[in-house]
Image (cartoon, grey):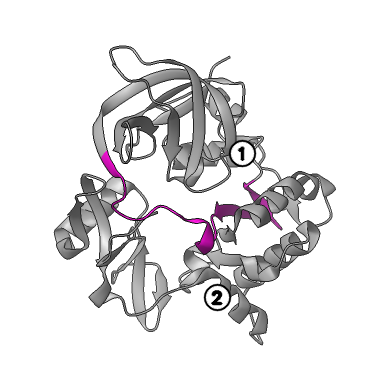
Amino acid sequence: MLHPPDRVIAYVRYFPDKKGCRQRGGLKYRKVYDLSARAKLLRTKWPEYIYWDSVFNRELEAVPMAKIKRQHLPVDKLAQLRRAPKLDRQQQSAVEMASTLAREAQVPATKVGVSGSILVDLHTNKSDIDLVIYGSRVARKCHSKLPSLLSSGNLGFSDYDKTDLRRLYAQRKQKACMSFSVFSQHEQPKRLQGKFRGTDYYIRCVRDWGEWHERYGAKRYFPVGKLVVRATISDATESIFTPCVYRLADVEAPGKRRAPTEIVSFRGRFCEQAHEGERVRALGTLEKVVGEGSPEYRVVIGEDPSDSLIVLE
């Protein structure tokens, strides 16, 4: 994600609430999940965190630099947990999972961090384990190792079963987008999600700091409108990263003068969703990208609950 010079784009996940079930430093907090609920919360209570971005040409959530009190860094948090004399069950599981993954994939432990509620000490005994892997080479090595870890049966990793998938299906409110059968066909093979010692996990792969080359403002992004597109995935090598990117060929985009060349999403649920050679149907926002040279077009999915990316039989 590219950030403007005066603020950091970020989306609220926890907020102080006397009725909240999470606690830290004597304060209670509540978790807000849905994107629409997050925007509504900020507009109601903290509108200063919503602004219009003239590069992305849409309303975004962000924290002004002057209001940032502390950075929570996933790699530093995991290192802190490794040194801690005493950990609770969720923290211990996160440390064990990260250590096992780094060891088995033969990658530096300093390229793996812990995110989510554990990062900010707002987890419960039912919280997921959220890991972050930094760097394309490290991420690909970990991703390649996950199938053997999931099938080993003795290192703590396991795939989701049907009960887990039904819970995930309901949590993501996917009924309007696809049947449970179709949802299962897409989710079951994914490696970046599953369970570790009975606890749900999700692994987010991101580019390392030195791998980002685009400068904020070098390109401008203009939402054109909703679009349903059918296409063949020509390149899915970036599908494990956030943001995930799918290059397209043989595009069918009725009524549009310029067909999109790629599908992109900033939401983890669309990672590993399709593979090279597969024919897909995507519903999202057509976006015009203006930089040097001729404008390009892409489909952004994940900004709306109805957005989807489905492999066609």
| Quadrant (top left/top right/bottom left/bottom right) for the N terminus | bottom left
Of 136 and 117, nearer the camera is: 136
Q: Secondary structure at mark 2?
A: helix
Instruction: Look at mark 2 in the image and give the residue it sits on.
Output: 77
Residue 69 location, x and y as percent? Answer: 32, 80
Residue 297 is left or right of residue 195, and the answer is: left
Give above or below for 183 relative to 158: above
- Residue that appears at 31% across and 41% down: 291
**25 above or below 175?**
below
Amino acid type, residue under disc 2 in the picture: Lys
Residue in view at x 55 percent, y 53 percent = 204
Which region is colored magenta?
192-221
**Rendered image: mark on residue 163:** 1
Which badge, 2 or 1, comes first in the chain's sequence?
2
Is residue 54 covered in magenta?
no
Observer-nearest of 206 and 30: 206
Kind of residue at disc 1: Thr
